[in-house]
Image (cartoon, rainbow, N blue to C red):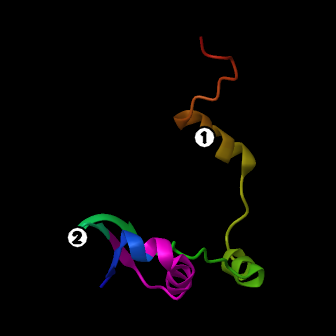
């Protein structure tokens, strides 16, 4: 549940609020008691370990480049001519 935060609190306590956002807290900013904005942490980017990724694809069949290109050409217009 986001905590309400006045515009004045946002201005005066920005450092504390940023640390709270780093911890995962969310806020609804109000002006004269009216909600005007929501502050929430951005979703953290997740990365996959290289070894885990290679293991996941280790048993996949080899890519047939010619067939892949033909399939791609069948659905995508790849004409390099500039459009007018």
Q: Secondary structure at mark 1?
A: helix
The reply, left or right, for residue 77 in relation to residue 32 is: right
Q: Quadrant of the N terminus?
A: bottom left
Query: What segment carries the magenta color?
Result: 10-29
Residue, far bottom? 23
Asked if residue 62 lies in the magenta stretch, the reply is: no
Disc 2: CA contacts within 10 A as few (<14), some (14-19) or many (>=20): few
**Badge number at residue 18:** none
Residue drawn at (71%, 84%), measured in percent from left and top?
52
Q: Secondary structure at mark 2?
A: loop
Residue, far top? 84
Q: Earlier in the sequence, mark 2 or mark 1?
A: 2
Q: Give x and y (percent) for residue 13.
A: 50, 80
Numbered marks: total: 2
The reply, left or right, for residue 49 in relation to residue 3 is: right
Asked if residue 19 lies in the magenta stretch, the reply is: yes
Residue drawn at (67%, 71%), measured in percent from left and top?
60
The residue lying toward the viewer, choosing from 34 and 68, is: 34
Residue drawn at (69%, 67%), measured in percent from left and top?
61
**Against 2, is 68 above or below?**
above
**Against 9, is 73 above or below?**
above
**Against 61, is 65 above or below?**
above
Q: Give x and y (percent) for residue 33.
A: 22, 70
The residue lying toward the viewer, choosing from 40 and 71, is: 40
Q: Read off the residue under disc 1.
A: 72
Distance of label 2 from label 1 (alpha carbons): 55 Å
Disc 1: CA contacts within 10 A as few (<14), some (14-19) or many (>=20): few
The reply, left or right, for residue 14 in relation to residue 40 is: right
**Badge number at residue 33:** 2
Q: Give x and y (percent) for residue 40.
A: 44, 74
């Amino acid at each position: 549940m986001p905590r309400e935060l006045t515009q004045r609190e946002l201005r005066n306590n920005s450092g504390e609020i940023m640390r709270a956002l780093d911890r995962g807290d969310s806020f609804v900013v109000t002006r004269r008691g009216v909600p005007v904005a929501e502050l929430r942490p951005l979703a953290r980017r997740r990365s996959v370990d290289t070894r885990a990724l290679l293991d996941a694809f280790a048993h996949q069949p080899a890519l047939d480049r010619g067939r892949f290109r033909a399939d791609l050409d069948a659905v995508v217009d790849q004409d390099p001519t500039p459009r007018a």
